[in-house]
């Protein structure tokens, strides 16, 4: 019997992008941990026979020193997605012209660095807007992957803001970070946005547990593992069982800090789980991906989106505008 599919993706947030989001002025140096990240990560994925989607930041792709590391993504059989150019988590406040500029700049830089045009987009910090979806549809994107259907987004934002060094203006810009309580009301599996223009766009959320809507992406599992590996295993298996029961094809998310330790980025000790060494984190990733592969055939995001379109039984939602203010 064929297993259902699940997609795996990684948001390739670089050292400087975490620093910027956290309010560290040192972000302007555009420091990178790609040399420490890419070889062991790609070797691990090869070991697991897992091909995934890397959502690449356009500003990173535009830096010549990063190109050899980003070119490894497609050379090793993975695919790329667009993670915006500037990685600003207040993307939902952009005007239409700002969105077009950001998306096109990122596209051009990613194509030049990797040789592949993105088919999908994920907003930084799960930021999105109806205007963004329209631009993606106009530009021929296959899918968006910017939503996280959970009720605990405001709690995650509160924790982040409590640990960040931000001015009042910076906090205002980040007040939609990780979404709102109503995001938990959206489906946990793929659905179709019906846009005001008449266009449509597939949405593949970062999957949360059906009904309860709590996350089970890799960073969350690593956080649980600090209390108990057994708790983490039980939580993951329960999440996957509920997805199978509900007929949900999961979209599973990783971040670079799921495989890097403080020895690689001591500036990011504020991030949960950075007290674990890289060796331990990679063992957890190896175990988790193995469990996913027991229950699902693992594919990149474009394959997930293509299957969702082919099934033609997607729920249809109309995007509602979030709170928007002009970007400064």
Image (cartoon, rainbow, N blue to C red):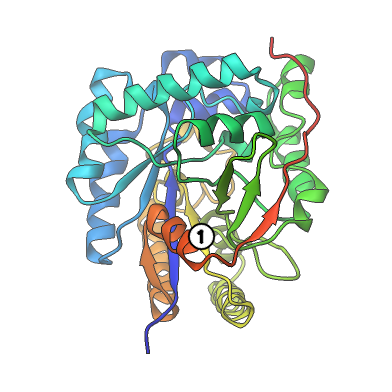
Residue sitting farthest toward the bottom: 1
Q: Secondary structure at mark 1?
A: strand
Is residue 61 shown to the viewer in this render?
A: no
Q: Quadrant of residue 12?
A: top left
- The front one of 218 and 275 is 218
- The front one of 166 and 269 is 166
Left-right relation of 30 to 72: right
Quadrant occupied by the N terminus: bottom left
Residue sitting farthest toward the front: 198
- The front one of 240 and 305 is 305
Quadrant occupied by the C terminus: top right
* Rendered residue at 77%/34% (across/down): 321
Is 38 drawn above or below residue 22 in the view shown?
Answer: below
* Rendered residue at 28%/58% (across/down): 45
Task: From the image, tell me which residue sits under label 1.
Answer: 251
Residue 42 percent coordinates (x, y): 25, 51
Crowd band around label 1 with a 10 angstrom C-alpha radius: few (<14), some (14–19), many (20+): many
Left-right relation of 209 to 142: right
Q: Quadrant of residue 89?
A: top right
Is 312 drawn above or below residue 247 in the view shown?
Answer: above
**Tally of marks:** 1
Is 59 drawn above or below residue 219 in the view shown?
Answer: above
Residue 235 percent coordinates (x, y): 61, 74
Residue 144 percent coordinates (x, y): 53, 44
Residue 320 percent coordinates (x, y): 77, 39
Is residue 230 shown to the viewer in this render?
A: yes
């Amino acid at each position: 019997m064929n297993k259902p599919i699940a997609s795996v993706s990684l948001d390739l947030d670089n050292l400087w992008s975490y620093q910027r989001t956290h309010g560290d002025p040192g972000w302007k140096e555009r420091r990178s941990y790609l040399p420490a990240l890419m070889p062991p990560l790609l070797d691990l994925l090869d070991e697991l026979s897992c091909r995934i989607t890397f959502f690449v930041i356009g500003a990173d792709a535009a830096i010549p020193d990063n190109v050899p590391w980003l070119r490894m993504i497609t050379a090793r059989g993975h695919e790329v997605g667009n993670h915006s150019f500037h990685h600003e988590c207040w993307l939902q406040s952009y005007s239409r012209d700002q969105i077009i500029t950001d998306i096109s700049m990122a596209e051009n830089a990613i194509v030049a660095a990797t040789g592949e045009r993105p088919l999908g987009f994920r907003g930084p910090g799960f930021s999105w807007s109806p205007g963004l979806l329209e631009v993606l549809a106009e530009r021929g994107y296959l899918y968006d992957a910017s939503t996280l259907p959970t009720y605990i987004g405001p709690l995650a934002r509160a924790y982040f803001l409590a640990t960040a060094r931000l001015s009042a203006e910076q906090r205002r810009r980040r007040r939609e970070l990780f979404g709102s309580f109503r995001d938990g009301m959206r489906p946990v599996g793929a659905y179709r946005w019906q846009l005001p223009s008449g266009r449509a766009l597939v949405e593949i959320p970062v999957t949360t547990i059906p009904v309860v809507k709590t996350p089970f992406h890799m960073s969350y599992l690593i956080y649980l593992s600090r209390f108990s590996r057994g708790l983490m295993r039980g939580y993951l298996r329960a999440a996957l069982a509920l997805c199978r029961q509900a007929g949900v094809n999961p979209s599973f998310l990783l971040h670079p800090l799921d495989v890097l330790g403080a020895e690689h980025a001591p500036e990011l000790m504020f991030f949960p789980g950075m007290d674990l060494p890289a060796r331990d984190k990679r063992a957890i990733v190896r175990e988790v991906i193995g469990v996913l592969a027991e229950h699902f055939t693992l594919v990149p995001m474009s394959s997930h989106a293509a299957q969702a379109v082919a099934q033609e039984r997607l729920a249809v939602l109309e995007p509602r505008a979030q709170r928007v203010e002009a970007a400064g």
